[in-house]
Amino acid sequence: MNNIIRYKLIILPTLITLLTILTLSCSLFCPEDRSKNYDHLREITHWTVDTLEYPGVEDLNLRTFWGSSADDLYVVGSSSQGLIGAVWHYDGNEWTPVPLHYMQGGEIDGWVWVEDIWGFSKNNVYIVGVDFTQDENYNSVDSSFVVHYDGNEWKEIKVDNFGMNAIGGTGPNDIWLGGIFKGNLSHYDGKKWTNYNDALPDQVYYGIPNFEDITQSKYNKTYAIVNNYNDFPYLVSTEGTEWKIEHSFDEVHYYKLHLSENGTLYTYGFFEIPISVWNNGQWQPFFV
């Protein structure tokens, strides 16, 4: 049995992630007294924990959440069986695996690595990742994987680009996909997908640029973290289709962003990296 969510409690030391879970679902780990208002997370001393497991899946790493309400929450991640068991949905009562792969009763074949999820309502949800399909010479193509849920069924969308690691933007007619290891970008304007694989400033491409995260907010500006691997991560932004550098991090472990609807930007990462807020062109500690 895999105590997946208990494990995630240990490796996600972030207030923002925890607040997202508390806001959208009390099934993962939630205070027993749900009627009480808490002024601080430290006041919550008793939690309930759900364990998610899928038959035949030995390694399940669920790491990204999105939901439209407390009764409509998704958690996605990676599975030792690719797409199988990598996507789960909570309906307010229980967690159930989303059957995307044909071996689950879905329509998708191949070996897929799920990376991120974003939606705008319970009937408009996107999941992205990497499709490790092999060509006729058994070489991995590492193409993009994008599926969309319209309230009735999940359908795979063809986006002709390299594998994707993040999804974000400002709304259903302004969606960005950020790639893994190549700094590639694809954009959806509500009608069609367009690739912008050279849209980042030149210095970001000096190495192996990997999109760690893209903000998901109605705010009219989109931010992203690009980890160069040969350099420190960059904070980049766009208000159209041209991207610019906002900041170069002095720590290599920042990997997530959160942008509020009023434009307040937060970041956080692994290994005791503190939660920070973007203020007047610099990062400041969220807790002082």
Image (tube, rainbow, N blue to C red):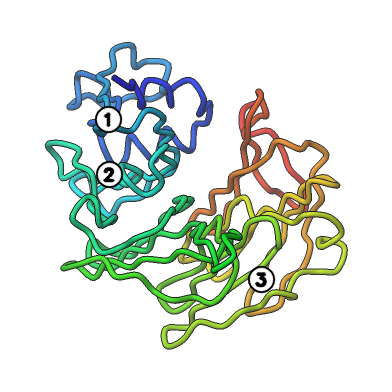
Which quarter of the image is occupied by the N terminus? top left
In front of the other: 266 or 271:
271
Residue bearing mark 2: 88
**Image location (x, y in percent) of residue 182:** 71, 62
N-term mark: 3 or 1 = 1
Cα distance in 3D space between marks 1 and 2: 9 Å
**Image location (x, y in percent) of residue 283:** 73, 43
Cα distance in 3D space between marks 3 and 2: 32 Å
N-term mark: 1 or 2 = 1
In front of the other: 155 or 64:
155
Residue bearing mark 1: 52
In front of the other: 213 or 182:
182
Amino acid carrying label 1: it is Leu
Dot 3 alpha-carbon crowd within 10 angstroms: few under 14, some 14 to 19, many 20 or more: some
N-term mark: 3 or 2 = 2
Residue bearing mark 3: 238
Among the 4 quarters of the image, the one containing residue 23: top left
